Amino acid sequence: MRKKRMLALMLVLAMAVSAFAGCSKNNSDKSSGDGGGKKEKDTLVILDTQVVEAFDPLNTALNYKLEWHQLFDVLIEFQEDGSMGPGLAESFEPTDDGKGYIFHLRDDVDFTDGTHFNAEAVKFCVDKIRSFELSSWVQAYIGEAEVIDEYTVRIDKVASHTKLLEFLSEYLYIVSPTAYEKDPEGFAKNPVGSGCYKFKEIGADGYIYMEANEDYFRGEPYFKNLVFRTPLDPSTAVVALQNGEIDMVLTMPQDQVEIIKDNPKFNVISSSGWGVKSVFLEGPNLMNDQNLRKAIFHAVNRENAITFDNAPEGSKPAKNMYSERMMGEHANFMDIGGYDVELAKEYLAKSDYDGKTLKLTITSDLANIAQSVQEDLKAIGVKTEINQLDSNAFWAAFADGSCDITIASWGCDYASLEEQMGFHAGNGYYGKILYNTPEFDALLADAANEWDDEKRGVLCEEALKLTYDFANMVPIYEDTMTNVYNADLDGIEDIWSATFNLYLYKVKLK
């Protein structure tokens, strides 16, 4: 179960949305002080991507990052270029042995209950999140924490390839130890952090209301009030944005972007992330037939799939097995080929395929791209039947290997390349439903225990070659997330659309 929770968080998924509800609470009148009676916005309204009901970031397998980044600070934050920069830690550096990081903390931060932030608070949060059953999967990333002095703490990596900095920015929200210990069960309804906003209430409309932290160490936020509105279907979201009922919509699909992109009242920002939309080939009908998998690999017309999937403007066929951000220095080190019907037919002729209809299992949001893939496979003589499931049933089927062929996004900002490949290893989460070899497992095991970057890179590239040769997945295109927001707003960064981490203390009116 722990691995299943981790997997759910690893994947970059399209968010479910619900029906339109409620009325706007976006603006309020207040004097500008110049006697002109100017109307000025004091409320920022964000359209949420999910329904949030609890606010304990330590005892959970979930990550409501849109809200939690406003209530709680983290040690380090994503910068505009995707690098890591200061948060509660003013600076940080690797330990001398390379097996962890030293964080030098700010000494001027208080939690909203008046207690003071220090290294003991960091250790408290590390110890707690590692101890709870629901969140114990983080032990695959966060090692032990050691207090060096009042404002210095060491946190260890779990493996040589662990992307500890990125993971801490995503999952180690720093809570008030005093408030947490006082009422552990009630903390989820009365959260206390040091963030730029304080929790106020969940309204009868399901909206989440917050108010500015006047004593925030970076300075009081520009907007006095912050509202996270319950999800809407994309077309309704566009109408609400145009009507001024909301200020920002996240992950807007391209067909809706087309409606609004030329409107000067709005800004559109897109950013490629760490995920690649891919076709996965699994289970007994495919894992033992490498020629059939390779036939499918070359049969998929990535250009058509991009068009059918209503992908963001500028999306291009994948050139790597994983996203370029995740590949890092290994990006484009080998040619993975692509759409080639004749080559696909050659592999099919050498396969054991007997004309059996294969299940092409998807969630509803992938119906269009599934039709494209289905037609591609039909063109080489492979029969498929589209099997549409709800999200929970889909991931259960994905995990037990009963899908045959699936389409999903794969990758996240805090996962290392070795870790992503490890899910497909014999001892990995999908090891029993995907083809792999003992050689592959050995390479990844050696890489996890190799602390020399250059030597580990060689092992990683050998594993990548095997990943390509296995043809367990067909990378189609890199996911690009698109956010749309009110053009009067300033301080919003492109990287937010790739990471989903919104640091709203930066946002103000122009």
Image (cartoon, rainbow, N blue to C red):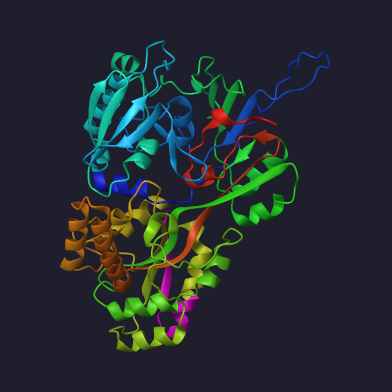
Taking 157 as reference, is 324 left or right? right
Looking at the picture, tell me which residue is in the foreground, 151 or 124: 151
Magenta region includes residue 197: no
- What span is in magenta? 375-390
Q: How many marks?
A: 0
Looking at the picture, tell me which residue is in the foreground, 271 or 81: 81
Which part of the image, by quadrant, shows the C terminus? top right
The picture quadrant where one finds residue 100 is top left
Magenta region includes residue 387: yes
Q: Position of residue 388 (x, y in %)?
A: 44, 61
Which residue is at 58% across, 51% downward?
A: 270
The picture quadrant where one finds residue 34 is top right
Which residue is at 24% across, 48% downward?
A: 160
Q: For residue 1, say whether it is visible.
A: no
Q: Position of residue 176 (x, y in %)?
A: 36, 18
Q: Position of residue 115 (x, y in %)?
A: 37, 12
**116 shown above or below 99:** above
**427 shown above or below 174:** below
Q: Position of residue 13 (x, y in %)?
A: 44, 51
Which residue is at 43% across, 27% downward?
A: 73
> Residue pushed farthest front?
96
